[in-house]
Image (spheres, rainbow, N blue to C red):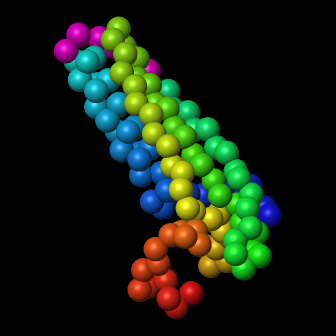
Amino acid sequence: MEYSKLSLMNGDALNGFMIDFDTVLQETLTKMLQNNETEGTITAQLKINLHNGTNNAGVDYVNPSIKHAIKGVTQAKSSTEGLLFGDYCLEWDRDTCTYILRPGEDAQMSLYDMGD
């Protein structure tokens, strides 16, 4: 399996990260303006764990968990954390040549998934 082309930023997988990043950015800018500060720092960290498994049909899959921490620092600090973990399978998408997250075997399928 080729992990070097992992691209999940454009999908739903990191929505929580993006929302939390925007929140910390807004809080940091607000504090900077309120305190008449001219410099601030935002640090983002993603911790990724891969868990191998096999479904009931004997197909191997990789289940990722992605934890994020975002910290904004001025004279006052703000931070938030989140975790993506659940019944997802990491899968190679031949059409886009990227890895995507698909709902796992126990996840509820939508009507649109029936054609796959």
Residue 75 image offset from top left, x and y in percent: 35, 8
Question: At x 44% / y 25%, what residue is drawn?
Answer: 71
**Left or right: where does residue 97 sit relative to residue 26?**
right
Q: Is 112 displayed left or right of 89 in the figure?
A: left
61 or 93: nearer the viewer: 61
Determine the residue positioned at 47% across, 78% down: 109
Left or right of 20? Residue 95 is: right
User: Residue 67: percent from the left, percent from the top?
Assistant: 54, 40
Q: Position of residue 34 (x, y in %)?
A: 19, 15
Quadrant occupied by the C terminus: bottom right
Can you say which quadrant of the picture contains the N terminus?
bottom right
Quarter location, residue 61: bottom right
Residue 37 falls inside the magenta stretch? yes
Q: Which residues are magenta?
A: 34-41
Farthest front residue in view: 56
Query: Disc count in the image?
Result: 0
Q: Is residue 111 above or below residue 33?
A: below
What residue lies at 52% left-to-right and 91% top-to-bottom?
115
Q: Is residue 88 magenta?
A: no
Q: Is residue 100 visible?
A: no
Q: Residue furthest left?
A: 34
